[in-house]
Image (cartoon, rainbow, N blue to C red):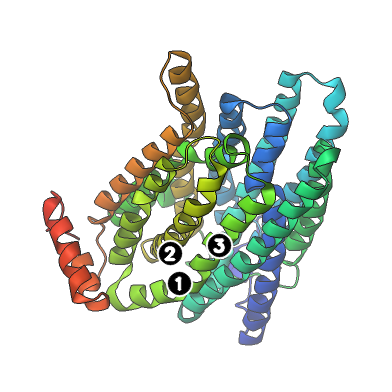
Amino acid sequence: MQTPGQSPALVADPTPAQVDRAIRCTYIQQMLGAVFGASTGGMFLIGFALALGANDVLLGLVVSLPSYAIVAQFLAAYWVERGVSRKRMTIGFGLIQACCWLLIALIPVLSPVLGLRPRFALLIGIITLVTLAAHFAANARASWVGDLIPPARRGRFFAHSMVFTGMVGAVFAVIEGRFLDVIRAHGLLAFAALFFFGALFGIATALMNVPQPECPLPGAAARPPFRRLLRDTFRNRPFRLLAVVHSCIALGGIAGPFWAAYCLRDLGMSFFVFGLLNALQTGVMLLTAPAWGRLADRFGCRPVLVLGLLLHAPCAAFWWFVPPGNLERAYWILPWNGIVSGFAIAGWSVALSTLVYKLSAPEGRSVQLAAYSTFLGLIGAPVALLGGALVAFLARTGWAVDLRLTFYLWSLFMFTAALIARRLPEADSVHTRIMVGKVLPPAMVRAWSVVADLMPWGRREG
């Protein structure tokens, strides 16, 4: 096993049997992690913040401030490139991340003796520590997986991972949403029970790394200087352009915490129904992700990315027809949003995750991933706070606005991402229009061509 300071070259390559065992363990790990994520994030964290007394600005703070911890990825990458065991980093920081949720579960106990500001200072502080540990673990694990899973098996590996994670996460989100609705009378203690339950699964997720083998870093035994790896990352133009595309998607985080807040607070939707809507979207993602993967293999990732973004961006229009308080209309309209969004997200997320590995070099990948993630994090970190503050400011000055304004701004960022994605250089990929012409009926192809011709970027791609 690799130890701190040990040369990466001294770690033996895993045998095929060890790789097979690691893949099986990873599938179990990701299902456990899906329960952890479903129990501690998303609608439950937003619901917990609302129950603590958060307004739109405080919701933005809860999401935005911990995001700056992403700069820790550079330190994580430095440790990886200097020979610190990626396996030990993943396990250690994974355990810290999970155990922090046990501290969050104690906030309801302390809430009666804490004012609003100390309450949220404590929550944001612990969430920041959770995020910090998660970034250390994620960087080490991503670099480790990139070398552990053979390239010929990565496509199936990531496809199966998405299925296992999405399926388990969606089911538990619905079950736990119903759980909160049933015991809502217990107030904050209901969230404490849920977070404690999730933390146990987080601990199990981290420990599932133990049976998986460490593997050597690519390259020579003497690692190149960290500064050179960082310089090479910024000289990789296709990788830089992909980061710009992804940063536009990250700017869409201006609506991040407000999808749940609008449904739970402004529409009065139950956790159970909101969980069902999320499960519908996830189910569509899981059903369509393999088809998107085959399209990416056949036509390239770029046209899949562009098409997925163009299909997803108009989904903000669904919310125009669901004003605050109109829960009945939401029941009729939002399932269609979930279907279209799930289909589109499956496309652009499969393409994006594949392009990150495709456009980065194996040597020094941890540094490239750290630079990539830090750039995205710093771009996206303040936008949720800005979104909440913008809505609050316009409402105070007399404008008839609500949280849906952030949804429309999200749509603009997604369209911008699609526009820039068309410039991504990718060998052996085709024009989006060619892919559409191969897979859609002629009438829909003609409609696509008319729309594309109206756009200033409709003719040129790649």
Q: Classify residue 94 by image quadrant.
A: bottom right
Sequence-first disc among 2 and 3: 3
Q: Position of residue 85 (x, y in %)?
A: 66, 60
**Badge 3 is on which residue?**
280
Side of 88 relative to 108 (left or right): left
Residues at discs 1 and 3 in contact (Cβ within 8 Å): no
Q: Is residue 193 visible?
A: yes
User: From the viewer's perspective, is residue 284 above or below residue 109?
Assistant: below
Q: Which mark is residue 226?
A: none
Q: SS at mark 3?
A: helix
Work out which quarter of the rendered image holds the C terminus and state it.
bottom left
> Which residue has dot 1 on it?
288
- Residue type highlighted by circle 2: Phe
Q: Which mark is residue 343?
A: 2
- Per the model, the C-alpha gap separating discs 2 and 3 is 11 Å
Residue ID at (23%, 78%):
438
Q: Are marks 2 and 1 in contact (CB under 8 Å)?
A: yes
